[in-house]
Image: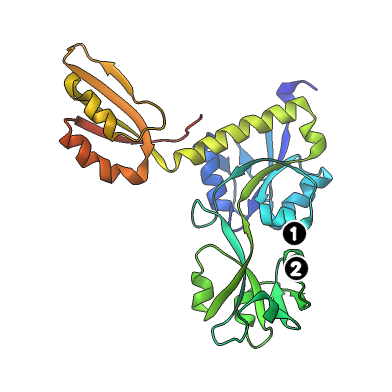
Amino acid sequence: MSDSKRQLILGLPKGSLQESTFMIFKKAGFNIGGSSRSYLPKIDDPELDARLIRAQEISRYVESGVLDAGITGHDWIVENNSDVVEVCELLYAKQGFRPVRWVVAVPENSDIHSPKDLEGKRIATEAVGLTQSYLDKHGVHAEVEFSWGATEVKCPELVDAIVELTETGSSLRANNLRIVDDVIESTTRFIINRAAWEDPWKRSKVEQLAMLLTGALAAESKVLLKMNAKSSDVEALTNVLPSLHAPTINHLQDAAWAAIETVVDEKVVREIIPQLKKAGAEGIIEIPLNKVID
């Protein structure tokens, strides 16, 4: 089969990660279409054949070879004990660009304050394997039951504690639960089947995707700043700029003036623009970025 007809079977996470995954792919240059309920979303790349699957299952299907590659959480790779190649970390989640945590949570008035206090207790969770490993690490014996959902509402009537995924803790607080301890921190990972990793074409395709996706994520927190300034003010301006690399400086037709551009963290822009203006910058432009490739 020629490379032009080859396809990489790619698992994309259905559910909480779906919207943010589609957004990152779009910034990376890939448009995903079709109904949100469809198992077979369409990507405008004939070399990609996508499947929309629950993140909890993707690592198992990648390990078995049903999928060549996929995007899922590190937590589910550990939970499923999947033997896969982790190509790269993709730092994003449902509500933002940060890790998520599995935590032990109990009612506010519970007498459980440490892992040892879980001895003999009943715990509900969707991540039974992660929870059992955590208990084993602490030498604690407890009853762990699988939860089909709405885990937060099961405390204290049905169980003594839960192990639940959280990003901000707001859902736990809303259910009058407090966090006792962290079980595992997790980020999204791009994974590939081990046999597929040994296939030169599939490996190359996955590495290209990884570069574009990580570039799109890197751009989420950065902007391009462009400005003009008198040549005599350039040194003072570059001292203000916290650039990704050295700023690009181009002298204009009028040798007394220069154009300066640089990539900076978006979070510092509001702090440095007044400083740049004070140091002599004119015509300052802030431009959002789609990708930053190192």
Q: Amino acid at mark 1?
A: Glu
Q: Quadrant of the N terminus?
A: top right
- Reading the image, the residue beneath label 1 is 79
- Reading the image, the residue beneath label 2 is 128
Q: Residues within 10 Å of mark 2 (few under 14, many from 20)?
A: some
Q: How is the image coloured?
A: rainbow
Residue 214 lies left or right of residue 88; in this view the side is left
Q: Can you say whether 122 is above or below 125 in the image?
A: below
Q: Is residue 46 visible?
A: no
Report how many numbered discs are placed on residues in the image: 2
Q: Amino acid at mark 2?
A: Val
In the depicted view, which residue is nearer to us: 210 or 179?
179
Image x and y of residue 44, in percent: 59, 34
Image x and y of residue 162, in percent: 65, 75
- Which residue sits at x=28%, y=31%? 239
In the depicted view, which residue is nearer to us: 111 or 218?
111
SS at circle 2: helix
Tag 2 near tag 1, CB within 8 Å: yes
Residue 272 lies left or right of residue 75; in this view the side is left
Q: Can you say whether 291 is above or below 67 in the image?
A: above
Residue 268 lies left or right of residue 46; in this view the side is left
